[in-house]
Image: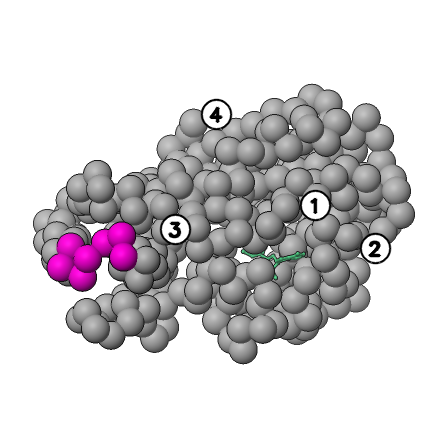
Amino acid sequence: MGISLFLGPRDLRGQNTANVTGHGASLRRMGGPPEFGGFSDVDATGDPGGYAGYLDAVRDVGAVAEWKERSFALLEPRPGAVLLDVGCGTGDDALVLAGRVAPGGRVIGIDVSAAMIDEARRRGAAGVVDLRVGDATRLDLPDDGVDGARAERTLQHLARPEEAVAEMARVVRPGGRVVLAEPDWATLVVDPSDPALGGELARSASERVRSGTVGRRLRGMLAGAGLAEVDVAARVLLVADAARARLLFDLDGALESAVAAGRVTWAAADSWRADVDRAADGGRYLAAMTAFMAWGRVM
Ligand SMILES: C[S@@+](CC[C@H](N)C(=O)[O-])C[C@H]1O[C@@H](n2cnc3c(N)ncnc32)[C@H](O)[C@@H]1O
């Protein structure tokens, strides 16, 4: 538990640099991350490409790739196994897993967004992964139908994530694993920021999705669903490059929400952004957030 990951300026490649305009205009900028709350219904946003692009940017982070790899290994993939990826997004993880259950195995990728499933097909998962549009809280699969199931950064977008966990426990056969990986947005910290503004940033970051603090609940939800051998790990994602932190954590969106809610004044927001610029120029900037992973075995 508690391994730190340090992302310096070169750990994220080719990402958009935030171009935040002055107050009065939206802090959200062209080319920046999409509104995270839109992941609950990507098809309704009219910008599925923006959401897929953000997932690619996250996937490019070396530390995230390691974290994904760990979740794959915890599923205990083997030739012939049937695995499920809930909230599969662009299908890239399901594709990797498909290679690990060949020959004879199968990976099912389910996502509530038809646009994401189309994108997964476009990327080559069609024919290799069994792609389906479906809701994590009502899986159209029989009891004990798969050997293992994972969900990564999906439960945060559900109002009642425990319903999806119960569904995953239902469809995994006895002895198989359920693996969950989610952030806990309330753990977001940024230096520089005074405690009041920093607290508001973390609060806004966690409130913009339906279950922004689900990370800390993963272990409890698996135990609550009756799984055995439940365990949990946490990693701190450290980002020392201000532009990259803005993209990965959508810090401008969080600040904008705090201002819109009347919890941070424009003056305080402007002053903070100036402090951030100075810290970035002086090599003193740091942002961090804790990501959790929990797993358990179906009895
Ligand atoms: C942040 S993305 C993560 C995608 C992928 N797991 C990854 O790690 O790249 C969240 C995904 O969950 C999907 N999603 C949101 N609500 C869902 C639901 N109720 N059932 C299934 N998928 C859902 C979204 O469409 C999106 O593709």
Residue at the spot of label 3: 205
**In front: mark 1 or mark 4?**
1
Q: Nearer the viewer, residue 39 or 24?
A: 24
| 269 versus 291 height, above or below | below
Mark 1 vs mark 4: which is more N-terminal? 4
Q: CA distance from mark 1 to mark 4?
A: 25 Å
Q: Amino acid at mark 3?
A: Ala
Camera sees residue 281? no
Query: Could you say which quadrant of the image residue 132 lies in?
Result: bottom right
Q: CA distance from mark 1 to mark 2?
A: 12 Å
Judge from the rendering whether residue 252 lies leftward or rightward of residue 233; answer left or right.
left
Judge from the rendering whether residue 248 lies leftward or rightward of residue 159; answer left or right.
left
Residue at the spot of label 4: 1
Mark 1 vs mark 2: which is more N-terminal? 2
Mark 4 vs mark 2: which is more N-terminal? 4
Q: In the image, is the residue at mark 3 within 8 Å of ligand 1 by its beta carbon?
A: no
Q: Which residues are magenta?
A: 262-268
Colour mapping used in the image = one colour
Name, please, the residue furthest toward the bottom.
46
Q: Amino acid at mark 2?
A: Asp
Residue at the spot of label 2: 140
Residue at the spot of label 1: 164
Q: Amino acid at mark 1?
A: Ala
**In front: mark 3 or mark 2?**
3
The residue drawn where x is 42% and y is 37% is 290
The crowd level at tag 4 (other Cα within 10 Å; few <14, some 14-19, many 20+) is few
Q: Position of residue 187 (x, y in %)?
A: 38, 38
